[in-house]
Amino acid sequence: DAGVTQSPTHLIKTRGQQVTLRCSPISGHKSVSWYQQVLGQGPQFIFQYYEKEERGRGNFPDRFSARQFPNYSSELNVNALLLGDSALYLCASSLSPRGGREQFFGPGTRLTVL
Amino acid sequence: GIQVEQSPPDLILQEGANSTLRCNFSDSVNNLQWFHQNPWGQLINLFYIPSGTKQNGRLSATTVATERYSLLYISSSQTTDSGVYFCAVAGANSKLTFGKGITLSVRP
């Protein structure tokens, strides 16, 4: 079975631009979460979606938004990019948003903002 | 929110040595996972272990939920074990809180 997939693998943008990252969860998983990992740190929670509804949001500005589609895939959008948005963006899927569910991560999208 | 502390921050081993990585957390959890992050950034699931003990080959893990810590044991280390090891926990929802990671270097 395919694992979590993300696209694109790498992305280079300039300050002020907008970016869209995509994630497809493991088949049968209905919950998708997004994390940001800056160099030298552990991943930080951005959003969680379940059944197309936002179930949780981390401490990120309104420039960050996301949505989930009927097939449970998800997009993360970041507007007005800043240099500090350069990071590895990771998507995770799980069966449900309950805390006791194991999460599985995709390979990530590495975003560089110049 | 839940705080996660991992120790030691860095570990250097000779190939064949054993090691213990520790994860302390500040509140009760419903999920605890250990990951190995490879050089390309992929987080590889090692263990899902909110409580108890599990073993997978040369790796094993123990979580003592009542005392709020977890240990990851690596025996007979190999150079391919090098990388960053993360502990992550979640409470009632599935938001994972990660520690800062432990960087392991195994020398031949």
Image: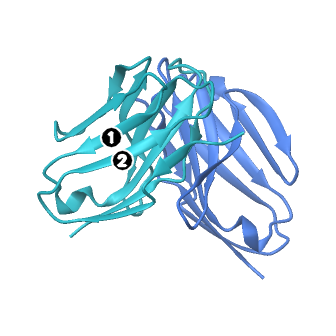
Chain colours: A cyan, B blue
Looking at the picture, tell me which residue is in the foreground, B10 or A10.
Answer: A10
- Residue B3 screen position, x and y as percent: 43, 36
The amino acid beneath tag 1 is Leu
- Circle 2 sits in a helix, a strand or a loop, which is it? strand
Q: Chain of mark 2?
A: A
| Residue position marked by numbered label 1 in the rendering | A76
Disc 2 to disc 1, how far (Cα)?
5 Å
Looking at the picture, tell me which residue is in the foreground, B56 or B73.
Answer: B56
Relative to A95, is B6 above or below? below
Residue A76 vs residue B45: left or right?
left
Q: Residue at x 22, y 59 (%)?
A: A84
Residue B74 vs residue B5: left or right?
right
Q: Chain of mark 1?
A: A
The amino acid beneath tag 2 is Leu
Q: Specify which label sits upstream in the sequence, 2 or 1.
A: 2
User: How many residues crowd around disc 1 within 10 Å: few (fewer than 14), some, or many (20 or more)?
Assistant: many
- Residue A48 screen position, x and y as percent: 40, 28
| Residue position marked by numbered label 2 in the rendering | A21
- Residue B20 screen position, x and y as percent: 72, 54
